[in-house]
Image: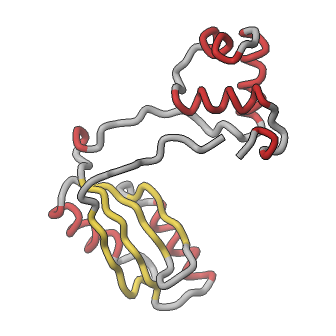
Amino acid sequence: MSDSDIDGLDRLDCKILRVLQSDGRITTADLSERIGLSPTATADRVKRLTREGFILGYRARLDPAKIGRGLLVFVEVLLDRTSPDVFDAFAVQVQRATEVLECHLVAGGFDYLIKARVKDMTAYRAFLADVILPLPGVRETRTYAVMEEIKTFESLPI
């Protein structure tokens, strides 16, 4: 994707986004140096990119194992029926599950794909019984426990 493929962004905006994705704690002064713009102009661009919704926020990446969330699982969920009321109820309930990192309504052989982190297999068994299976409309699940993380999300290509 070239810089011109992103509506409303010029080359410097794209550069700012690339740098911030790799180092969200960079100072405005260092960022301005990296992109070749004054600190004031750089700060104005970052504020605009935030205001326009290109930058959604900043966060620290934590080591899952060190905080008791070492097991990553993906769960396919098949619903007993697909209707707006079931989708809505499912979405409300899954939002409350702190173990769930991501949940996607998908096209294909099942309805939802859930990405979750728990401590271990014992914790996963409890999560499945107490959180996933009671979700509205759940008929069937398939779980894939991750043995090794090869590539995790770092940044979007810009």
Measuring from the top left, give residue 55's x and y in whole percent: 66, 36
- Specify whether 134 is left or right of 20: left
Residue in front for this viewpoint, 34 or 54: 34
Q: Residue furthest left?
A: 122
Q: Residue at x 80, y 36 (%)?
A: 9
Q: Is residue 69 above or below residue 112?
A: above
Q: Quadrant of residue 78?
A: bottom left
Measuring from the top left, give residue 24's x and y in whole percent: 54, 26
Which quarter of the image is occupied by the C terminus? top right
Scheme of image coloration: secondary structure
Q: Residue furthest right?
A: 8
Residue in front for this viewpoint, 122 or 113: 113
Q: Residue at x 35, y 72 (%)?
A: 132
Measuring from the top left, give residue 140's x and y in whole percent: 36, 85
Q: Is residue 11 above or below residue 25?
A: below
Q: Is residue 54 above or below residue 75?
A: above
What count of labels does the image hold?
Answer: 0
Q: Residue at x 55, y 74 (%)?
A: 106
Measuring from the top left, give residue 69's x and y in whole percent: 26, 49
Q: Residue at x 52, y 90 (%)?
A: 81
- Specify whether 5 is left or right of 74: right
Q: Residue furthest front?
A: 2
Residue in front for this viewpoint, 5 or 29: 5
Q: Quadrant of residue 10?
A: top right
